[in-house]
Image (cartoon, grey):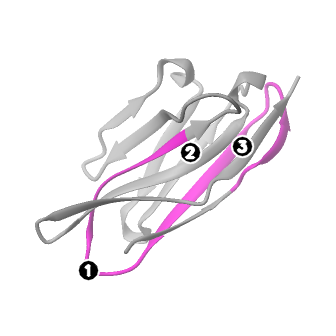
Amino acid sequence: QVQLVESGGGLVQAGGSLRLSCAASGSGFSIIAMGWYRQAPGKQRELVAAITSGGNTNYADSVKGRFTISRDNAKNTVYLQMSSLKPEDTAVYYCNSEVLWGVLATRSWGQGTQVTVSS
């Protein structure tokens, strides 16, 4: 099973920046895609951004132009650079991975990291 370890959350003022990191550990798999989701209180978990092994990216409309997802394939690590943060970005951010074990694909979730943006 893939273990995802997240870091980088915290408290920031509106307009500020934060960088989240997520490292996938384990062996015997190849990463198809990694991404970040978020869940605010009382709301459903939603996709924030995702990146494939080939570097294709996908962003939620609400974060386009403010957030940038990137990855270091050698380190099996994905990053989310968040800029111009808004109070509505406050949520628990979860890392997600989709990996291939031979012909079997599995998804894993990190434990979540809190991002709080004060107005």
Question: Left of 60 or right of it: where is 111?
Answer: right
* First reached walking from the N terminus: tag 2 or tag 3: 3
Locate residue 111: give its quadrant.
bottom right
Question: Callout 3, which amino acid?
Answer: Leu
Q: Residue at x 70, y 55 (%)?
A: 8
Q: Which residues are magenta?
A: 8-37
- Residue extending farthest to the left is 103
Place of residue 83 in the rendered image (x, y in percent of width and height, measured from the top left):
67, 32
Asked if residue 24 is positioned above or below residue 58 in the image, the reply reads below
Nearer to the camera, 20 or 98 = 98
Q: Would you call the spot at circle 2 few (<14 residues within 10 Å), some (14-19), or many (20 or more)?
A: many
Q: Residue at (59%, 26%) from the top-left corner?
A: 66
Up-down relation of residue 36 to residue 30 (above or below) = above
Front-most of residues 57 and 100: 100
| Res. 18 mark | 3
> Residue lying farthest top?
61
User: Residue at label 2?
Assistant: 80
Q: Are marks 2 and 1 in contact (CB under 8 Å)?
A: no
Q: Which residue is mark 1?
A: 28
Residue 119 sits inside the magenta stretch:
no
Q: Amino acid at mark 1?
A: Gly
Q: Amino acid at mark 2?
A: Leu
Q: Please provide percent x and percent y for residue 30.
A: 25, 67
Mark 1 residue crowding within 10 angstroms, few (<14) / some (14–19) / many (20+):
few
Give the main secondary structure, helix, strand or loop, of the magenta stretch: strand
Q: Secondary structure at mark 3?
A: strand
Which quadrant of the view contains residue 110? bottom right
Quadrant in the picture for the C terminus: top right
